[in-house]
Image: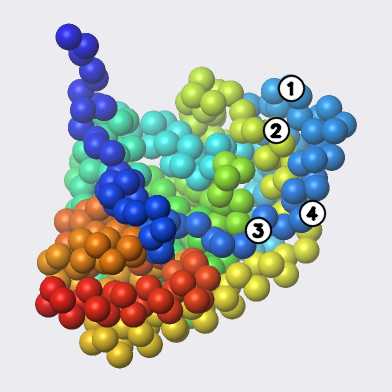
Amino acid sequence: MPTFSDRVERIAVSGIREVFEAAGEDAINLGIGQPDFPTPEHARQAAVDAIEAGRADAYTGNKGIAPLREAIAEKHRADQGIDLDPANVIATAGGSEALHVALEAHVSAGDEVIIPDPGFVSYDALTKLAGGEPVPVPLREDLTIDPAAIEAAITDDTAAFVVNSPGNPTGAVSSEADVREFARIADEHDVCCLSDEVYEYTVFDGEHVSPMEFAETDSVVVVNSASKLFSMTGWRLGWVYASADRIDRMLRVHQYAQACASAPAQYAAEAALRGDRDVVAEMTDSFERRRDILLDGFADAGIECSTPQGAFYAMPEVPEGFVEACLERDVIVVPGEAFGEGGRGHARISYATDEEDLREAIGVMADAYEAVR
């Protein structure tokens, strides 16, 4: 009889994946968090050029190629005014690996990690894989993360707290005042603030700010990714940046788990960061338009939903049986409890799909809601 680690037995297959497997082949998919835009042509071509020139045949340095890390540093200098040393950047296999190495480097067995509830599914699972204990903290009614709730949850065993703005699964955007509080809490309590900023460019209302902008110590670690910024989910290219000491520890994990990010993807991401970003504005405008279509449809159906300020997700309040009723009608939505107990009574909708399918799905969701309420 095989014996498995306690850590792996503490986690299960993602609730998002379970919904996909239960759906029909022709179902409209409102469950996947993936932009429906092509990767920018100049990013694709940069990968092709690197492959044809033989520059993608070998391992890169563990942290990634210098031009990519310089482009990442330039991006954060321009967007957040942060004087980021490229040496303090690690290119990773997507934002997922960046989260993994950050938690592995900062969490010891039994340490607590405060996570938003509902929150992205990886926060809970990766904390457990690192041997830590997730401490879910409920969100406000508007689905934003409450700094006071985070501070109240800190104990002597707290190693880190996770913030995510714009948020998955909520679409909520934290205010500058709240982000300043995240930085203060991390500084004053000497606790790592892990800031997941992968939806940074997809903001409709307000603006994105990072706790790194306000921290007075090295208390903040930032995770980001080309996946959602430039519609490059399949390229699996993310990054993490922090102080030199923190990067040194995360590099120790990364070099054994991954060695280096995919070389072609690194060249593509560098080009995306340095090239024309018109597609970013185009995507944001499109997602905002689709958000408004969705909210209008929910209002017509009598479905309550907080207004998402960013990303491309909404979390309407739904009755029991709603998700199943949608699946029976060939529309995939994700149950809110897949993201934590705080999501129970909600569903997560990804509106990163074309408008025709979205409008059809809205009609189906209205029928499903009427059938089960």
Q: Amino acid at mark 2?
A: Ala
Q: CA distance from mark 1 to mark 4?
A: 22 Å
The residue labelled by disc 3 is 38
- What percent of the width, then of the height, locates residue 96? 46, 42
Question: What's the residue at 50%, 57% (across, down)?
Answer: 34
Q: Amino acid at mark 4?
A: His
Q: Amino acid at mark 1?
A: Ala
Question: What's the residue at 51%, 76% (across, down)?
Answer: 355
The vertical placement of 327 against 64, above or below, is: below
Side of 44 relative to 16 (left or right): right
Mark found first going from the N terminus, 1 or 4: 4
Q: Residue furthest right?
A: 53
Question: What's the residue at 76%, 24% (across, down)?
Answer: 57
Mark found first going from the N terminus, 2 or 3: 3
Depth check, front residue: 87 or 140: 140
The vertical placement of 289 against 208, above or below, is: below
The residue labelled by disc 2 is 263
The residue labelled by disc 4 is 42
The C terminus appears in which quarter of the rendering? Answer: bottom left
Q: Residues within 10 Å of mark 2 (few under 14, many from 20)?
A: many
Q: CA distance from mark 1 to mark 2?
A: 8 Å
